[in-house]
Image (cartoon, rainbow, N blue to C red):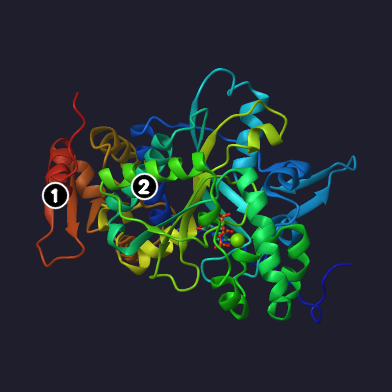
């Protein structure tokens, strides 16, 4: 049925919690992404890209059946042949799957990083979305606390270089070995059973399936009973305790401050030993910007050989919000147009195109917009002004006859200036402080 006058076409909107990144905001993302990319190379990490869709079983088996993500947050659907597929809710499981599938874990160590969108069906709010983006690192084959310290130092350097260092806190804990956790689990179950009356529905269910998850509850009414619970850190096995002590000593030697948070358990099942989060007070309740830890059992759990592993993921939306809130994106990073080239009439268009190209060759750092779309001279100048450029380069019949252009200063009170086309690149280089290409 075709739409009629009394039945207007309903405009299609983006899905709730899934955001467009608009041109005004994208320079801030690009700034952060460029810093991250550079940092990863400096630490010897190589990028890995995996598909956004995986078999559902990959996430169910790795993240854990009894976790918020697997129980209620995954975007799962049937493929046309009936296979159950899931949009990735996080990056670690896919990274392990790919590393195993391609033999990257065979007699070698790996230091990998990734970035991209993740999907979780959560309640959208500031700092929490249904499609969000993470940058993560994963290392394989290294079991000592030195690599734990190295990935933490990498993240700390990023905060330092972004100007965030004084706004973030490192929280640290150790979950010990699987055996130590199993013993602690019984202690914890006994404790929560004594407080059955204050447990919410989720927690009561988890009491039998996964009592550690109760510690991760965000329900404020549970805060008190959780605060009083016995602590895993007091039930660590000897080897894990020593690993944790050595990590803390390495961080102290490197000058990285931290707080041990015995209640930090993380929302995913695959962690063992070290877990950590970087948090900030500047974002309200969505204050964790980066989280990770060791997951020595995961590769084996997914059918590979035992392989020690440690990594983290940071939330890009939260980081961009933080940079915005604290006004830490440098003005240069916001880009913008340096000059707007205006052919004053249609006859000047071919020469304007050629001039623009020669300027872009001579000045690779110059952001030059060529006026397109014709219009009256007045409307062309309006567009020049709207471009935000400090400078308009005008090319009309007179200028063409002289092999020259007219420079018009759009932001300061300064006389316009006639410049020969042959000297224009040099003039622009000094006006915009962009170096000339060396020929
Ligand atoms: P939270 O406790 O905030 O739910 P989480 O423990 O579920 O976080 P991880 O799975 O460890 O988070 O993901 C690592 C980081 O990714 C988080 O610290 C956060 O910065 C970011 N993140 C996680 N979920 C979301 C989301 N729904 N929207 C935006 N960022 C997110
Ligand atoms: Mg979560």
Q: Which residue is mark 1?
A: 431
Q: Which residue is mark 2?
A: 248
1 and 2 marks in contact (CB < 8 Å): no
Quarter in which the N terminus is drawn? bottom right
Viewer-proximal residue, 361 or 154? 154
Secondary element at image label 1:
helix
| 161, above or below 124, in the image | above
| 411, above or below 77, in the image | below
Q: In which quarter of the view is residue 322 placed?
A: bottom left
Q: Is residue 327 left or right of residue 86?
A: left
**Residue at 81%, 78% in the rendered image:** 7
**Residue at 38%, 47% in the rendered image:** 155
Query: What separation in Å lies between label 1 and label 2 (alpha carbons)?
Result: 52 Å
Between disc 1 and disc 2, the foreground one is 2
Spot occupied by residue 224 in the image (x, y as percentages of width and height): 56, 78
Q: Is residue 36 visible?
A: no
Quarter in which the C terminus is drawn? top left
Q: In which quarter of the view is residue 44 placed?
A: top left
């Amino acid at each position: 049925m075709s739409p009629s006058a009394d039945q207007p076409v309903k405009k299609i909107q983006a899905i709730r919690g899934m955001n467009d990144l608009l041109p005004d905001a994208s320079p801030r993302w690009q700034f952060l992404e460029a810093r991250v990319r550079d940092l990863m190379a400096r630490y010897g990490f190589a990028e890995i890209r995996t598909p956004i869709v995986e078999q559902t079983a990959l996430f169910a088996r790795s993240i854990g059946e009894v976790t918020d993500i697997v129980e209620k947050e995954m975007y799962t659907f049937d493929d046309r042949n009936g296979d159950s597929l899931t949009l990735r809710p996080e990056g670690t499981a896919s990274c392990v799957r790919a590393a195993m599938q391609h033999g990257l874990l065979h007699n070698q160590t790996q230091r990998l990083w990734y970035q991209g969108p993740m999907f979780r069906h959560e309640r959208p709010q500031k700092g929490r979305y249904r499609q969000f983006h993470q940058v993560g690192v994963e290392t394989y084959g290294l079991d000592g606390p030195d690599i734990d310290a190295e990935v933490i130092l990498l993240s700390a350097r990023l905060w330092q270089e972004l100007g965030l260092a004084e706004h973030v806190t490192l929280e640290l804990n150790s979950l010990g070995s699987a055996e130590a956790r199993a013993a602690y689990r019984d202690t914890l179950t006994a404790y929560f059973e004594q407080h059955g009356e204050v447990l919410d529905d989720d927690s009561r269910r988890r009491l039998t399936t996964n009592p550690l998850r109760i510690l991760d509850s965000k329900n404020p009414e549970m805060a008190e009973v959780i605060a009083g619970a016995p602590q895993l850190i007091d039930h660590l096995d000897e080897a894990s305790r020593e690993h944790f002590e050595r990590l803390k000593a390495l961080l102290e030697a490197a000058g990285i401050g931290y707080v041990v948070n015995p209640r930090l358990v993380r929302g995913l099942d695959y962690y063992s030993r070290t877990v950590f989060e970087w948090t900030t007070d500047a974002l309200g309740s969505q204050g964790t910007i980066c989280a990770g830890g060791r997951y020595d059992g995961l590769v084996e759990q997914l059918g590979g050989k035992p392989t020690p592993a440690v990594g983290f993921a940071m939330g890009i939306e939260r980081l961009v919000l933080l940079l915005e809130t604290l006004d830490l994106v440098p003005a240069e990073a916001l880009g913008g147009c340096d000059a707007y080239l205006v052919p004053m009439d249609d006859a000047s268009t071919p020469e304007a195109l050629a001039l623009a190209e020669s300027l872009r060759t001579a000045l690779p750092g110059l952001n030059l917009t060529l006026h397109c779309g014709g219009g009256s001279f007045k409307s062309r100048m309006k567009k020049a002004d709207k471009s935000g450029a400090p400078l308009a380069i005008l090319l009309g019949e007179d200028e063409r006859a002289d092999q020259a252009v007219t420079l018009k200063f759009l932001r300061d009170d300064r006389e316009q200036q006639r410049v020969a086309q042959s000297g224009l690149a040099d003039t622009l280089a000094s006006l915009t402080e962009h170096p000339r290409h060396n020929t």
